[in-house]
Image (cartoon, grey):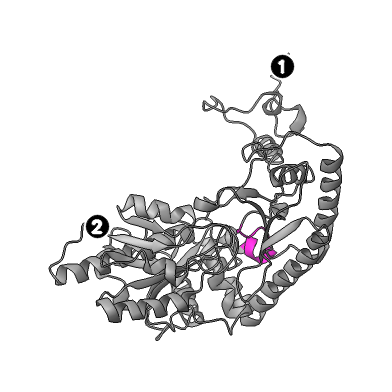
């Protein structure tokens, strides 16, 4: 009589009758046995349903929609290490093409010969621009026989990446104060803070807190006068995380902000914001080769061939860079202009609709000449409501919308605002549905007065993501 052993774990087992899905997923200790891939895939996929719907995340600056072709290119590139330029020379070539296209877009004196690099996001790009400025300042000070132990940088209200840069590289960050009606750095603010130890001034071209541009030319003009009076020459790094990929297409007549200003030595941007690429890629470009100190560039040969590199990371994926190049070729100037213009149009629709509630005062109304496709508002002074903007943000979450409420920094921390980012994929139809949910939320909060939420209760957005 033949003996038959029953295999109780077959590849034909139904997923929801399998041993894997009858157990709780491991959280602190590696499981002892291997398990069926389809069951583990389903288990993790089910957990991910508890994340918010990215398309309804109106807090994030990052892209939440990509064409199918981008997904295919990402799959093709999943095993390509961007640092290994000898093994993947065409990916390296594509990276270089993107740098030169951006240099041309930002009016570099010679876009074909200048230098730049991709990064994992605009935070890393900012830090590389800051490091280059620090080294240039040190070289000038040493040439004059002057001390280099007390560098500082001057900026308006900035995102946390600049606080990291200042702390990590021991640079004093002199941040202008934000208060009621005064939301970004002015030339007068800047001149109170700069001195011979200032390595750079950093205007934010698309402020995280409000969406407003910090105007670059007035700052540059003021620094020209300052240099004439004192002999101190101070460079500008433009943090163009969002605006550098918007203004060239939607505000071509805006006051000068890019390499046409000689004092602008570097510009950073985020490819995964309004560059329309998937997370995570950023870019930094220098005005000329001379503006990137050679001492910051490392040359490695242990992957085969000489590979110059200037980055905080080493190994990183090539897919996002290739996707950036796809977008440049696929969309061209006209495509970027149409997509971004549509975002600004939705901003206009939202402002009109929100104004009808007669509750909100706009900090920024999404004007394409003065900021990014975003709107920010607070409750009108004098309007008494039985709820706060934190309550409203919390209520909108019940319909899946993340519309962050938060307080402004420094002297403005008593001002609580809300903000919406309008990105590719947030259509007029979705905006109409959002406004309907605003009305439902306001009706509920007016008829069910509640103890007001705090920022922690509402799980409000913070400004650390780049």
Contact between marks 1 and 2 (CB within 8 A): the answer is no
Q: Position of residue 237 (x, y in %)?
A: 40, 69
Distance Cα–Cα, label 1 vs label 2? 85 Å
Q: Quadrant of the N terminus?
A: top right
Q: Is residue 192 magenta?
A: no
Q: Which region shows up in magenta? A: 61-72
**In this view of the protein, which residue sits in the foreground, 137 or 115?**
137
Q: Quadrant of residue 453?
A: top right
Q: Vertically, is 385 above or below 62?
A: above
- Which residue reaches farthest top? 1
Residue that carries the numbered disc 1 in the rendered image: 2
Q: Position of residue 299 (x, y in %)?
A: 27, 64
Q: Vertically, is 340 above or below 76?
A: below
Which is in the foreground here, disc 1 or disc 2? 2
- The residue at the point 65 percent across, 74 percent down is 368
**Disc on the earlier residue, 1 or 2:** 1
Q: Is residue 66 magenta?
A: yes
Residue that carries the numbered disc 2 in the rendered image: 150
**Horizontal side, residue 298 vs residue 392: left or right:** left
Q: Vertically, is 386 above or below 152?
A: above
Residue neighbourhood size for the residue with mark 2, other residues' Cα within 10 Å, grouped as few (<14), some (14–19), many (≥20) = few
Q: Quadrant of residue 422?
A: bottom right
- The residue at the point 47 percent across, 52 percent down is 160
């Amino acid at each position: 009589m033949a003996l038959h052993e029953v295999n109780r774990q077959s590849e034909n087992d139904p997923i929801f009758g399998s041993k894997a899905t009858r157990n709780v997923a491991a959280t602190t200790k590696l499981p002892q046995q291997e398990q069926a891939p389809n069951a583990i895939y389903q288990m993790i996929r089910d957990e991910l349903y508890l994340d918010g719907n990215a398309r309804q995340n109106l807090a994030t600056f990052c892209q939440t929609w990509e064409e199918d072709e981008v997904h295919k290119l990402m799959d093709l590139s999943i095993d390509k290490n961007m640092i290994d330029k000898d093994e993947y020379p065409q990916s390296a070539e594509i990276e270089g093409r993107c740098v030169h296209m951006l240099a041309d877009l930002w009016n570099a004196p010679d876009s074909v010969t200048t230098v730049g690099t991709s990064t994992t996001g605009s935070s890393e790009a900012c830090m590389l621009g800051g490091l280059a400025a620090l080294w240039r300042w040190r070289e000038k000070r040493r040439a004059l026989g002057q001390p280099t132990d007390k560098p500082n940088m001057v900026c308006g209200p900035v995102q946390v990446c600049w606080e990291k840069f200042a702390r990590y590289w021991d640079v004093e960050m002199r941040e202008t104060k934000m208060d009621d009606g005064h939301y970004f750095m002015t030339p007068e603010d800047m001149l109170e803070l700069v001195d011979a130890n200032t390595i750079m001034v950093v205007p934010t071209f698309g402020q995280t807190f409000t969406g407003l541009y910090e105007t670059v030319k007035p700052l540059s003009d003021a620094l020209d006068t300052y240099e004439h009076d004192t002999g101190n020459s101070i460079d500008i790094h433009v943090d163009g995380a969002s605006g550098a990929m918007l203004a060239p297409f939607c505000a071509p007549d805006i006051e000068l902000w890019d390499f046409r200003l000689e004092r602008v030595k570097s510009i950073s941007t985020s490819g995964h914001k309004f560059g329309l690429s998937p997370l995570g890629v950023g870019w930094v470009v220098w005005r000329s080769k001379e503006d990137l100190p050679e001492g910051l560039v490392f040359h490695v040969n242990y992957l085969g061939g000489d590979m110059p590199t200037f980055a905080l990371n080493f190994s990183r994926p090539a897919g996002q860079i290739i996707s950036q190049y796809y977008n440049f070729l696929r969309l061209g100037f006209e495509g970027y202009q149409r997509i971004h213009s549509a975002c600004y149009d939705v901003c206009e629709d939202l402002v009109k609709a929100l104004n009808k509630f007669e509750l909100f005062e706009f900090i920024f109304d999404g004007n394409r000449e003065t900021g990014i496709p975003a709107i920010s508002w607070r409750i009108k002074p004098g309007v008494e409501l039985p709820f706060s903007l934190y309550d409203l943000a919390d209520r909108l979450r019940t319909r899946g919308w993340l519309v962050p409420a938060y307080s402004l920094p420094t002297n403005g921390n008593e001002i609580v605002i809300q903000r919406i980012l309008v990105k590719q994929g947030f259509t007029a139809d979705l905006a109409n549905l959002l406004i309907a949910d605003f009305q439902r939320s306001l009706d509920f909060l007016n008829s069910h007065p509640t103890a007001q939420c705090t920022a922690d209760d509402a799980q409000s957005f913070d400004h650390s993501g780049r």
